[in-house]
């Protein structure tokens, strides 16, 4: 899940909420939406290719 911050940057959050904090985990902050989408694809690839 990618959200745009007030600063204009984009932050990648995990899809599931952390049961302890009930919040989504921060998976990185990026300057452009393109960079954030690229990293999201990398994360998804890594999850299925351990």
Image (spheres, helix red, strand yellow):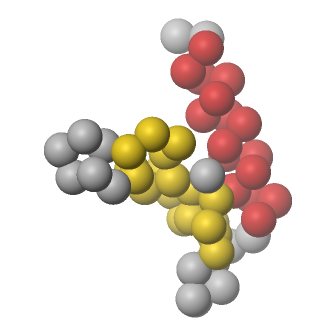
Q: Residue furthest right?
A: 34
Quarter where residue 4 is shown: bottom right
Task: Give the answer, above or below, for where 18 lies relative to 11.
Answer: above
Q: Farthest left residue?
A: 20
Q: Residue furthest bottom?
A: 7
- Tell me residue 44's x, y (percent): 64, 29
Point 49% across, 45% down: residue: 14
Query: Does residue 48 sit above or below 23 in this rendering?
Result: above
Residue at image location 53% in from the left, 42% down from the top: 15
Q: In this view, does 42 lie to the left or right of 24?
A: right
Q: Is residue 15 left or right of residue 23?
A: right
Image location of residue 27, percent across then percent down: 48, 50
Measured along the vertical axis of the image, is residue 13 above or below residue 4? above
Q: Out of 39 and 20, give the one closest to the viewer.
A: 20
> Relative to 26, is 44 above or below?
above
**Identity of the residue drawn at 57% across and 80% down:** 5
Which residue is situated farthest in the top direction here? 50
- Relative side of 1 to 33, left or right: left
Where is residue 10 drawn, in percent x and y?
63, 70
- Is 46 on the left or on the right of 16, as rendered? right
Q: How many marks?
A: 0
Res 40 → quadrant: top right
Q: Would you identify the image quadrant in which residue 48 lies? A: top right
Tell me which residue sits at (18%, 44%) in the image.
Answer: 20
Q: Nearer the viewer, residue 6 or 46?
A: 6
């Amino acid at each position: 899940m990618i959200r745009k911050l007030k600063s204009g940057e984009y932050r990648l959050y995990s899809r599931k909420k952390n049961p302890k904090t009930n919040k989504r985990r921060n998976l990185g902050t990026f300057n452009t939406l393109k960079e954030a989408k690229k990293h999201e694809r990398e994360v998804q690839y890594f999850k299925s290719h351990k």
